[in-house]
Image (cartoon, rainbow, N blue to C red):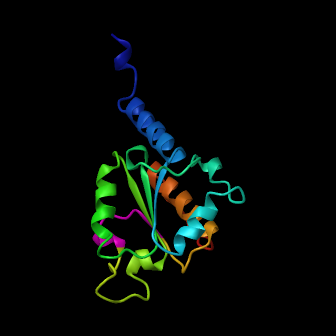
Amino acid sequence: MGLEENLPSGILLTNLEKFVNYSRSASLWPATFGLACCAIEMMSMGGPRHDAARFGMEVFRASPRQADLMIVAGRVSNKMAPVLRRIYDQMSDPKWVLSMGVCATSGGMFNNYAIVQGVDHVVPVDMYVPGCPPRPEMLLDGILKLHAKIRGETFVEQGSK
């Protein structure tokens, strides 16, 4: 009779999966894709006042091969959509996308032929941050909810029970 027979099956794998997901969520490295005024708010989130380093986001990566989170901030034009897709394809797996602002999410007030009506037509989006432009605090809240999604937790909205 070996030790393997005394252990419940699946415990090690479940704990290892939770550990790996926690590690992934605690060290997201963002690749910025700032296209409009939302990019200013995203840059301010990286500053000392909001201190994104406490969430494992020390520095924004300039190379997509070093990043696993793409923050799309601002309106995406039809000319920029292939570039956005190419950068997304160059990111290593697993990768996540956060759509920041109403222009990235739905085209915003630019309902015309030149602007993509939602970045989800180009890349799959994991988290949406509303606003025009959203405050850095809202971006941090979206990132924290993305952390919970990566860990496999369910998050509760404020005010609900």
Q: Is residue 14 above or below residue 71?
A: above
Q: Between 152 and 94, which is closer to the camera in this rendering?
A: 94
In the picture, the quarter occupied by the N terminus is top left
Q: Between 84 and 153, which is closer to the camera in this rendering?
A: 84
The x, y position of residue 89, in whole percent, is 29, 53
Q: Quadrant of residue 14?
A: top left
Q: Work out which residue is located at the far top of the displayed protein and give it.
A: 1
Q: Determine whether, in the image, residue 75 is placed left or right of residue 144.
A: left
- Looking at the rendered structure, the number of numbered marks drawn on it comes to 0
Q: Determine whether, in the image, residue 33 is placed left or right of residue 46.
A: left
Residue span colored magenta: 119-128
What residue is shown at x 28% (from left), y 86% (from top)? 113
Q: Work out which residue is located at the far front of the displayed protein and give it.
A: 79
The x, y position of residue 23, in whole percent, is 50, 40
Magenta stretch holds residue 87: no
Q: Is residue 161 above or below residue 55?
A: below
In the picture, the quarter occupied by the C terminus is bottom right
Magenta stretch holds residue 127: yes
What residue is shown at x 46% (from left), y 79% (from top)? 102
What residue is shown at x 41% (from left), y 32% (from top)? 11
What residue is shown at x 29% (from left), y 76% (from top)? 78
Q: Between 2 and 87, which is closer to the camera in this rendering?
A: 87
